[in-house]
Amino acid sequence: MKKVWAFDIGASNGRLMLNSFDGEKMYVEEIYRFPNHPVHITENDYWDILNIFSEMKKAIQVSIQKGHEKVESMGIDTWGVDFGLLSKTGELLANPYSYRNPKNVKGMEEALQHITSDELFALTGVETAPINTIFQLYTIKQNNPELLERAETLLLTPNLLAYLFCNVKSNEFTISSTTQMLRAGKAEWETDILEKLGVSSDLLAPIKEPLTIAGDTLPSINKELQIDPVKVIHVAGHDTASAVAALPIQDNQSVFMSCGTWVLIGVPVDEPLTEDKAMKWGFTNEGTMEGKYRLQKNNMGMWLLQQCRVIWEREGIQTDYEKENYLFEEAAPFHSFINPDDPRFFNPANMIVEIQQYCQETSQPIPETQGEIIRCILESLAMKYNWVINRLEKLTTKKLKRIHIGGGAIRNKNLCQLTANATNCEVVAGPVEASSIGNAIGQWIALGEMEDIQQAREIVHHSFSVQHYQPTERSSWQSAYERFVQYVNATSY
Ligand code: LFR
């Protein structure tokens, strides 16, 4: 049985999954998991990239201790948009900023005085959002110009980590497509945008196709970890692109939904769709492992609940999955709704207070108990996903019948069932570890062990079980949706 290491690093935790393939079926084993959170220092939020790197090395050691030292290759996928800057001598210049840095909002507003959102969407096919690399660069230019003056190379997070392992400087296509700096429909940097904003496009390391070999682990790493050189493969470096590659989608009436801190909902398309409506409704076009596109909307996901848990834990209230389920069942349905994508929920000081204030300001009952808060969040999320899928049907002129959900949040069975109820679609949930499986698929294809993504999806289909959820309680959901949409319709988020 051949094995590969798939590093799937998310914005709340990172993990090393061992993926084995016997020519017919794939098997996954979690080797190691570690927390990953932005670190707040005075006015900025940073990623502790050196900690991530040392946790990755620790993960390799754990794999060796578990008897899995012989692997064919390794691949790394991460969240999008963030990056590190290297000096002329190839050293990391600073801790990478986190996309949740509050300063990016002002940076975006200022940058949009030089280039409009419409122009940007037409050029890149990507939704304008303060988290995008383009606006982060502009924010750095305004607040920390010395950093840009000293920087020679920009590497996106998965490629920065790959660089630390194999010393190769390049940016893979799918992760590059999250920057809002790629030319729509091409694997090329749209350099004019940066020039317009006064940032040198020389920073941008060349783009590499996914499913190619970046290099071998460095002698210093091999010595430190006592391993033979391992091939580092450019998988689909964007976690969402990897996740979508692993969903066992079998027809063209299916929607993908990759669920974690964020929930990304969309359909695969051959070319970016840049019509006005797509822009107005906040859709975006990002790259797939096959070098094509995902027409999708980036939505709020488990972040809302994760941030409530932070507050509950701080107050000494114990939270666990079982208990949350029970409390959800106890609370009355359709009590109050929020628009989960309202910018006020992006990084509030206290998520619970923010939700309560929203309900108060919109003259709805205020959710007080833990159960009421959980219900308000999950029902609002499911309603929002229905709103997105309705618009996706209009854009693609297709009736969408099935939703393939992957990612950690499918462990939340309520979310899966509510999504089926709200959308009137069948929900097919699985695999949970979609990103890491997609990451491994990228490696198996690059190694010639799997032919292409179609074959890979069939292998996923008979390697991992999925769970089916059928819509129920339609009429009560339909009438509650009428109430929900009033909080969304007037906005583009
Ligand atoms: C999901 C994700 C989304 C991206 C967000 C921020 O993990 O990659 O696709 O919009 O993180 O980068």
Image: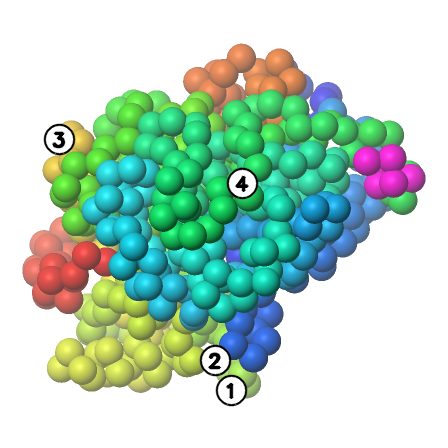
Say whether residue 214 is visible: yes
**Residue visible at 14% across and 41% down in the picture:** 276
> How would you rate the neighbour count of disc 3 (Cα within 10 Å): few for under 14, some for 14-19, many for 20 or more?
few
State the separation of the CA atoms marked 3 and 4: 41 Å
Say which of marks 3 and 4 sits in front: 4
How far apart in space, not on screen, are marks 4 and 2 (Cα)? 43 Å
| Residue pictured at 32% horizontal, 43% vertical | 126
Circle 1 sits in a helix, a strand or a loop, which is it?
A: loop
Kind of residue at badge 4: Asp
Q: Residue at x 36, y 68 (%)?
A: 106
| Contact, mark 3 vs mark 1 (Cβ under 8 Å) | no
Q: Is the residue 18 above or below the residue 385 in the image?
A: above
- Residue that badge 3 annotates: 397
Q: Are marks 3 and 2 in contact (CB under 8 Å)?
A: no
Mark 2 secondary-structure assignment = helix
* Crowd band around label 1 with a 10 angstrom C-alpha radius: few (<14), some (14–19), many (20+): few
Label 3 – label 2 distance at C-alpha:
43 Å
Q: Nearer the viewer, mark 3 or mark 2?
A: 3
Give amino acid for label 3: Thr
**Does the residue at mark 1 contact the one at mark 2 (Cβ under 8 Å)?**
yes
Q: Position of residue 26 (x, y in %)?
A: 60, 26
Tell me the SS state at disc 4: helix
Q: Which residue is mark 4?
A: 202
Residues drawn in magenta: 218-223
190 vs 414, nearest the viewer: 190
Label 1, on which residue? 315
- Check if residue 345 falls in the magenta segment: no
| Element carrying mark 3 | loop
| Image-based side of 203 in relation to 254, left or right | right
Residue occupied by mark 2: 311
